[in-house]
């Protein structure tokens, strides 16, 4: 800084000072730009960071969950050399979500999505219906790109279930809202292209069942992060997952199926429950990580009332996990006691239990596992999964023909339920 002495006073040459300050500021901005450029590159190239924990950062826009920035390219999660249709569907959902994230920067679409998810039995809104609304009748390029991507989506998938060889599954583009009950629809949504992390990539072993999500920070910058089921259910931001949904399941309203509180066991049977023990799966649907082998089921009692049978985390639920089966354990017989049903199921000839097992994907909409009618009541079994044919016990189309054989299990103590895709044994248990 140039200083000129005048008498006893030191006077700063203002012009020189300003020029040097501007130069310093420019150098600082350039250094910051280089830093963030390098940082951005480190999150998008093919090589993972040495320590993924270093990228966990609380961000003020999302004040209710910690966020983990995505260290890999989305394309590396989508690539699937074993299923060309799966790769095609993921790419198209990514395209739809990429255009939608610009439209959904704020909460202006939240109310219409909430309305659809609130009605649907599987918490979904049909995107074909959304693009037909007045809200999207716009001449803007973003709006027209979104409409075009939805209308031209080809979500057909050739089944990978060995018992459904050659069957082509058809889906509609949809938004699945897993946290619709607890979300604050005044808040900015998290936009998820429906892409699951490949946990077999280097450094990603601890991120099995995480998915990619986007949101905009206070400065309008797009942030790409990873979230899991716990994050999605705990955040108060609406979670919008772009999904290939079953059209019939999306149309079914929540009011179509109401479950009653299960009745306590009758006095003559107070010590008898039904549990599973042995199980085995012979087929793998997962592209990476372990298979979440899950069960769903319901009872229709003699009066035509429907009851849930699964108990998860101490309360009745529409599903529960039997086991997480690693790739190396496909085809292995396991022996582990699991609760199946403790409801009052007498008399056996007028009480009916229907169930199915499947590979669960929390970030995908529920798809049908069959429906059954007895005593004037119809129940619908569903399970969150990527594709409709990812079931183990029963083809959903024949569920109605396969109620649990309560007589045989009670009087013979157990019964196997086998097919080429696996085994499952239900036991009578006297407590």
Image (spheres, rainbow, N blue to C red):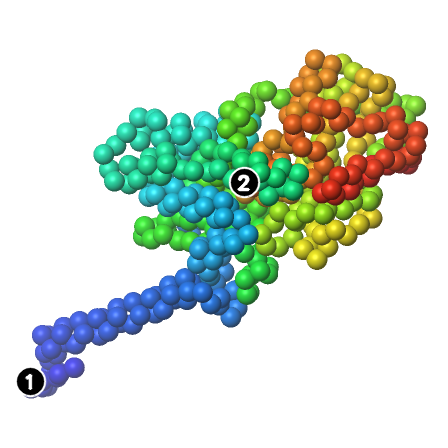
Q: For numbered disc 2, what is the local secondary structure? A: strand
Residue 406 in sight in this render = yes
Q: Is residue 376 left or right of residue 210?
A: right
Image quadrant holding the C terminus, namely top right
Q: Is residue 98 left or right of residue 170?
A: left
User: Alpha-carbon neighbours of circle 2 within 10 Å: few (<14), some, or many (≥20)?
Assistant: some
Residue 67 in sight in this render = no
Q: For numbered disc 1, what is the local secondary structure? A: strand
Q: Earlier in the sequence, mark 2 or mark 1?
A: 1
Vertical relation: 144 (above or below) 5:
above
Residue 367: image x %, image y %? Answer: 58, 33
Q: Residue furthest front?
A: 166
Mark 2, residue position: 158
Q: Residue at x 43, y 38 (%)?
A: 154
Q: Residue at x 37, y 33 (%)?
A: 151
Q: Across the whole image, how many numbered discs are drawn on residues?
A: 2
Q: Is residue 285 left or right of residue 315?
A: left
Residue 124: image x %, image y %? Answer: 49, 32
Mark 1, residue position: 6
Residue 236: image x %, image y %? Answer: 49, 41
Q: Residue at x 37, y 63 (%)?
A: 40
Q: Is residue 370 left or right of residue 62?
A: right
Residue 316: image x %, image y %? Answer: 71, 33
Frontmost residue, 127 versus 392: 392
């Amino acid at each position: 800084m140039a200083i000129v002495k005048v008498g006893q006073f030191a006077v700063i040459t203002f012009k020189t000072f300003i020029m040097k300050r501007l130069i310093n500021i420019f150098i600082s901005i350039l250094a910051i730009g280089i830093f963030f450029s390098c940082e951005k590159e480190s999150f998008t190239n093919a090589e993972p960071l040495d320590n993924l924990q270093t990228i966990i950062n609380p961000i003020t826009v999302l004040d209710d969950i910690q966020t983990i920035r995505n260290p890999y390219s989305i394309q590396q999660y989508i690539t699937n050399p074993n299923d060309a249709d799966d790769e095609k569907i993921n790419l198209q959902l990514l395209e739809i979500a990429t255009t939608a994230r610009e439209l959904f920067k704020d909460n202006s679409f939240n109310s219409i999505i909430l309305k659809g998810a609130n009605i649907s039995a599987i918490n979904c809104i049909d995107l074909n219906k959304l693009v037909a609304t007045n809200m999207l009748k716009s001449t803007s390029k973003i709006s027209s790109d979104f409409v075009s991507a939805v209308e031209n989506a080809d979500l057909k998938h050739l089944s990978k279930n060995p018992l459904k060889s050659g069957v082509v599954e058809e889906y509609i583009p949809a938004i699945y809202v897993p946290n619709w009950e607890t979300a604050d629809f005044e808040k900015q949504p998290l936009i998820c292209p429906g892409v699951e992390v490949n946990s077999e990539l280097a450094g990603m072993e601890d991120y099995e069942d995480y998915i990619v999500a986007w949101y905009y920070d206070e400065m309008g910058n797009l942030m790409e992060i990873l979230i899991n089921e716990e994050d999605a259910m705990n955040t108060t931001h609406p979670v919008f997952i772009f999904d290939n949904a079953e059209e019939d399941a999306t149309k079914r309203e929540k009011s179509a199926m109401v479950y009653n509180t299960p009745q306590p066991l009758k006095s003559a049977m107070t010590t008898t429950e039904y549990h599973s023990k042995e199980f085995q799966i012979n087929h793998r649907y997962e592209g990476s990580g372990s298979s979440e082998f899950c069960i769903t089921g319901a009872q229709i009692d003699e009066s035509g009332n429907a009851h849930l049978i699964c108990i998860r985390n101490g309360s009745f639920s529409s599903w529960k996990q039997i086991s997480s089966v690693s790739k190396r354990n496909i085809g292995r017989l396991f022996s582990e006691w699991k609760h199946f049903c403790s409801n009052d199921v007498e008399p056996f000839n007028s009480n009916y239990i229907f169930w199915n097992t499947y590979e669960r994907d929390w970030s995908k909409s529920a798809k049908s596992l069959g429906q059954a009618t007895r005593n004037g009541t119809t129940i619908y079994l569903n399970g969150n999964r990527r594709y409709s044919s990812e079931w183990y016990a029963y083809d959903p189309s024949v569920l109605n023909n396969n109620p649990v054989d309560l007589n045989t299990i009670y009087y013979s103590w157990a019964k196997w339920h086998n097919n080429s895709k696996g085994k499952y044994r239900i036991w009578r248990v006297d407590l």
